[in-house]
Every structure is written in structure tokens, then in C-alpha cells.
Amino acid sequence: MPQAAYALLVRLRIGAAALLILTTTVVTSQASDEIRVRLASGREFSGFVDQRTDDDCLWLRCSGTGIEVIRPIKWQRITETKHDDRLLNVAELKLLAAELKSRSPIETSRSQHIEGNKIVMQGSRDTSAETYDRAIQASGPVTGPVRSVDFDAQIANWDGDVEPDGLLVHVYPLDGNGTVTPVDGTLSVELTVPRRRDYSQVPHGRGMSVDRIGRWSRAIRATDLTASGVVVKLPFQAVHPEFDNDTWSHGLVHLRLAVPGHGVFEDSMDGLRVREFAPLRDWMQSHTGHRHFAHERTGRGKR
């Protein structure tokens, strides 16, 4: 082989090896930034720490083929975190999250437009999350079939008093590629909780019964989809766990999304907290029969 040709072949091999090393390093670096969290409800989510993360919420970002989902998770809901095969507590996760924060590719885009059921992105760093939400809303009804639905539920307070007001449900309709898809449908939710009864009323249950304390039905529209999925507020009904001393602190929520032309999708979440974890309030409830101080404003009055 001529010397010049041999030298060229060596340089090509060195260049290919360098490119392979660089690519492997980038992929490994991106993979090492991913975290997995387990919530008190038993749900697990994985993704990258978004720049929105603050003292109130961990914002976890994951992406599909045509869209990104950025999910806010209250720190107090996290029970376990894994990063690089290492288990972390919440305090360690907060320190790590400050280092792993990154900007969403959607927010770094200059312009976005809809092609079919995909969001096409171009450009630099001037587009806000609000533009992303408007782009999803402009996409109209889904063109591909819904294959599954991811649900998440938690108790939440959305007004000016001190107690939780009901369930906050996030709905993520997914197509065959795991991409969040806007749909029209009907969401049905039932909340079932154990309750104390007089022993004579339920002797077979030793003074305990399992009762449905909430039932809701809401219409879902394609334009309701945001970066946090479809968010639905479901106020507590006749039985409010914060004011009913016979209600247990945990229950089961059953969720059902019926999408015409696509099917019916269901899930159940056991171990859902229906009353906030509050050691002092729990002690007050067991000794005084109520959970709130006289100076606290509540939505239903104090018992």
C-alpha cells in the first residue's frame, strides 16, 4: 500500500474512533442526568430535571416522538429517588436537582408549527412554555388512535383556606408511540375510602365499612391539553376527609376515560392520601375531634 494512502487510512480510523468516543460520552452524559422517582401513591416517573424546578415542586421532563411532557411533582409526595443506581432521599434529590436542571428543547425553539399530530420546532431560545401550550391547542383533534392513558391523582388546595379542597387529576392520553395526544372524551372518577361505623351496623366488618365518598364526571376537550396533561379539579363532596373523623387517611381512586372511536381506558390508584400527613393535626383530631386551630380559616367550619 502506498505510504500516502496508508497515512490517510490511519487518519480516518483515528477520526472515526474519536467520533465514536465523543458520541458515547454525550449519550452517557445524557443518560446519567435522568432520574426516577416513586410517589407516595406508588406511581413511578422518570425523566430529566427541568429548569422550572424550585422549592415547591420538582419539574420532571420526558419526551416522546412529537411532544414533551413536563410534570410538576410536589417534593413532599416523593418517597424514593434513584439516580445512577443510587437511592437518594428528598434532601439529596434537591441538591442534585440544582445541578441537573436543564432547559426544555421546546423552550429553546424560535418557532413551532403543527404537522399532523406533531409539533415541529426550529430556531433558538426565545419561545415560552405558553407558546407550546397554544401550539398544542391549535393542533385540533387527534389523528392517530389512543392506545393507553396515564393518570395521576393527588389531594390539592386551590383556594384561600387551609385545608385540601379535593382531588387534582392529571390525564395523559397516549398514542402507540407513547406520545401525549389531544382527545375529546369523558372522565369518570370514583373515590372509595374505609370508614369507621358502629359495630352493630357492620358486625361482619368489625365496625369498618368501605364506602364511596366521591363520584365525578367531567367532559375532556382536545383544547384542554397542556404541558401538564389535562388537569381536572374535583372538589370533595358530601364527605370531606378533613372534617369527617370517621374517614381513614388513605383510599382508592378509580379513573376511567371514555374516548369515542378509540375505546375506554381505566386505572386504579390504591393508597392515595385523602387527608394530608400532619402529625400535630392527627394528634389534635384524636384528642379534641378537630384538626384546625381557631385562628385558621377553613371552608366548612371547625368541628
Image (tube, rainbow, N blue to C red):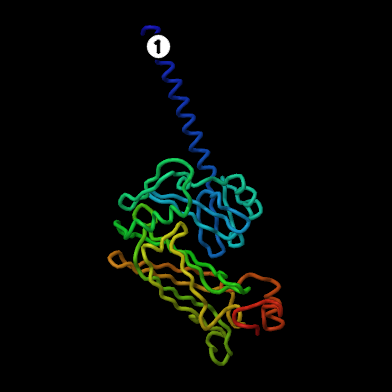
Residue at the limit of the structure toward the top, as seen here: 2
Count how many numbered circles sit on residues in the image: 1
Q: Quadrant of the C terminus?
A: bottom right
Q: Determine the residue positioned at 36% across, 8% down.
A: 1
Is residue 101 toward the left or the right of residue 296 in the image?
left
Estimate the x, y position of residue 127 in percent, counting from the top left: 46, 47
Q: Quadrant of residue 6?
A: top left
User: The residue tagged with tag 1: helix, strand or loop?
Assistant: helix
Estimate the x, y position of residue 17 in percent, counting from the top left: 46, 25
- Tell me the amino acid under the disc marked 1: Tyr
| Residue designated by label 1 | 6
Estimate the x, y position of residue 106 in percent, counting from the top left: 45, 47
Q: Is residue 34 above or below residue 194?
A: above
Estimate the x, y position of residue 102 in percent, counting from the top left: 54, 45
Is residue 83 toward the left or the right of residue 267 in the image?
right
Q: Determine the residue positioned at 59% across, 56% down.
A: 80
Q: Is residue 38 above or below residue 219?
A: above
Is residue 132 toward the left or the right of residue 29 in the image?
left
